[in-house]
Amino acid sequence: MKLSITLLFTAAMSASAAFVAPTHNNKIVDTTMALHMSSSSSRRDFVASASAAAALFGMNVSPAMAEPRPMYLTEPTDEFKASEAQRMEFKRAQLLLKKKMQDELDTLTAEKNDEDALAQDINNIRQTVIECGGMPLGIKKDDLVKQVRAKKAKGFWPTKVEYAYQGLINEIAYQQSPNKDKDVANPL
């Protein structure tokens, strides 16, 4: 115990000696230069002496560091397998909905100039959005809008079809963000 106190005192003294300003022929060097040299050399000396003191006194290996690492599972658990099955089922259902919507979009873009047929195609897409609860995975709203606008740009787009298209856009917006708790007091 006395030896460790003596060693600690010696390390502290060497560290404190590093804070003394350097002298040149018993004259103090320019104060700004002395402060700069003193601070950089004293930090190095202090770090060196403090690390030496820490190495002598406090570096015991803790039992937590000596324990082996935990073993990972070699087989998936039953809960993980059930979760994987649910994910695969969801993915299959989404792929079917994506195929159905893509077929409906292809029908819409290939449709000739028939007002009732175009409106019915857009309403079919709207029903798919409702049953899916939004857009199916793999089809983005922007992609759908681009395809419909391309069809619209070809020329024949009567009012009934435009109403159906606006209803589709509103339905997609509602399904993606259903605000069912309306604040009656706040009109915004």
Image (tube, rainbow, N blue to C red):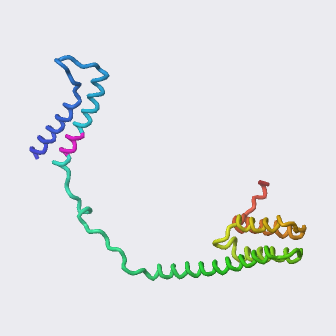
Between 157 and 6, which is closer to the camera in this rendering?
157
Q: Position of 78 compared to 106: left or right?
A: left
User: Which quarter of the figure has residue 61?
Assistant: bottom left
Q: Is residue 91 magenta?
A: no
x, y (%) of residue 4?
A: 12, 45
x, y (%) of residue 13?
A: 17, 34
Q: Which stretch did the figure color magenta?
A: 47-53
Main secondary structure type of the part rendered in magenta: helix
Between 139 and 76, which is closer to the camera in this rendering?
139
Between 146 and 94, which is closer to the camera in this rendering?
146
User: Which quarter of the figure has residue 110?
Assistant: bottom right
Q: What residue is rendered at 23% in x and 18% in y?
A: 28
Q: Position of 40 compared to 147: left or right?
A: left
On-image quarter of the C terminus: bottom right
Q: Vertically, is 56 above or below 75?
A: above
Q: Vertically, is 101 above or below 173?
A: below
x, y (%) of residue 135?
A: 69, 71
Q: What residue is rendered at 88% in x and 74% in y?
A: 113
Q: How many marks?
A: 0
x, y (%) of residue 81?
A: 48, 81
Q: What residue is rendered at 26% in x and 68% in y?
A: 68
User: Which quarter of the figure has residue 173?
Assistant: bottom right
Q: What residue is rendered at 83% in x and 76% in y?
A: 111
